[in-house]
Amino acid sequence: MKLISLQYRDPANSLQAYDFNFDNGRHESNVLEPLCFVGLNGSGKSKLLEILAKIFFEMDRLWRNTNRKKPTVTANFRFEYQLLPSSKYKEVVIEGRVGKTLIVRCDGNELAPEDLESVMPSNIVGYSSGNNETISTLFHELREREFGRVLQEMNEGGKGSRDLSRTLFLDRDSTKLLLLTAYIFAGKNGQGNLPSAASTTKLLEKFEEFIHLQQLLSFQIIVDDDSGRIVMSQRMEQVIEKLKRCALMSSSVEQGKGRIVKLDFFLCEQSKKAFISEFGSGQDFFERLYELYSLNLISSTKTRSHQVFLIPETELKVLVNSPLAETHYLNLSDGEHQFIQVFTSLVYLAKQDTLFLLDEPESHFNPAWRAKFVLAMDDLLEVKQKSSEFLISTHSPYLVSACKKRNVFKFTRNRDGKGVNYQPLIDETFGASFDVLLKELFDMQGLVAEIARAALQDVIKGKLTNKQKIDVLKSDFGDSFEKRLLIIMLEKGLFDAVSD
């Protein structure tokens, strides 16, 4: 899928006004072309990701509530996107009016609610490096509503077998699930051969190359229903039984109406075969365990914190090289956690019609990793996976330099403060140097810290001789274009000429 355009107005908030045209000829499904959103803090990048998620969540609600009261929208918008040429439908237009039911048209014809699944993303994956509440809260609220419907079904005598929508928000805890998935299912094909065995193997090679992670050794899973307060569906109970059959050791402690299940795992070829036999693919494993993990969203109260599903970091052990040593997962750095999180989710969750909403996915990376970010994406993703839509908000020139100008959107606030605009870029960004992009995208006039810039100016304005000024510049300041330029001007007496 590829986004075409969005016009959005929130009558309750004049700051939320968007008019974006994404249609830039990105029709080759075998080419990776992420949309890159850049701009100063508060310019509206993250808010756009939230709006897009809201629209698709509203579609999901309409589809799942076909026989009940139709949900109504709270903003006025028109959103258009394009599906793959092989799809049943090609052009999809979603229109929302305040207080009205969502209208979805495909190739000019209105689509019935029960048919919406065919034009929705198979996965909507959200990520925010700083736990951006505008994104994370949205995903969590949707999952809480879904659990509410499952619980209602069970209270009415059902089994709670209703499928949850494939809306996934990635946080630190879900990273542990992704790590398990990567090592257990390495070398195996995923659903419909996406990802391929070669791609899952290559992912572990990236782990070794970038973060020196060589192996997952052992881990523990704890399921605690809080004395029976958290009721699990039949499908969740089946997942727990599957995990028991894969565990090295398991114990179940009954506590009144509730229980605590502890499962210990040692990862070896035999245990990998057990996981593959029980769960099939890496996607099935991750999605089923993510459903259990999501129970944590509803298990805590205002006065008490409780986790139904837990992978203790003190029991999660990995093997690293350089030097070769066993260590705990919690000893990995934020950048290493982020690397596992982002690239494992790309490999295992990207399908031909997945929507990734990535808010600063490289914020904890060092400059060398940032410069390789899009290259690593391109190397790991299958050709079919590259037809997914990848939306990346960033402050990094490293990512922008890896993207074509047509796919880069510079966000700015309108002068009256009402609404968000995007500014067309004049020069090509692909392959542009980082200093050029910093000036173009973030209005930086120099590439040294402001305190150092002020100190340079103090030296030039001081009463020392030109030779003394040059000596101070050479001894007290690191190498930079600004320093070298000032030295040349002092040597040639250009400052004297100006003052005269």
Image (cartoon, grey):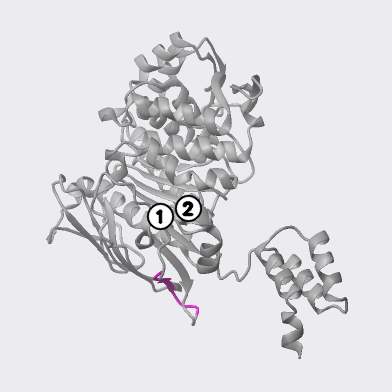
Q: Which mark is residue 399?
A: 2
- Magenta stretch encompasses residue 421: yes
Rendered residue at 47%/23% (across/down): 183
As drawn, is 85 to the left or to the right of 131?
Answer: left
Question: The disc labelled 2 sits on which kind of residue?
Answer: Leu
Identified at 20% across, 48% down, the residue is 84
* Residue 281 part of the magenta-drawn span: no
> Which residue occupies 58% across, 36% down?
336
Question: Quick one: SS at disc 1?
Answer: loop
User: How many marks overall?
Assistant: 2
Q: Which segment is the magenta one?
A: 417-425
Q: Is residue 324 above or below residue 60?
A: above
**Side of 250 relative to 154 (left or right):** right
Q: Residue at x 59, y 35 (%)?
A: 306
Residue 188, horizontal then vertical, whole percent? 35, 21
From the top left corner, tell me how far across and down residue 294 is, in percent.
Answer: 47, 37
Q: Amino acid at mark 1?
A: Cys
Q: CA distance from mark 1 to mark 2?
A: 7 Å
Q: Which class describes the residues within 10 Å of circle 1: few (<14), some (14-19), or many (20+)? A: many
* Dots 1, 2 in contact, CB < 8 A: yes
Whether residue 433 is visible, yes or no, is: yes
Q: Which residue is mark 1?
A: 403
Q: Residue 161: x percent and y percent?
A: 31, 31
Residue 211 point in image, percent of width and height = 57, 32
The answer to which of 392 and 50 lies nearer the viewer is: 392
Quarter of the picture holding the C terminus? bottom right
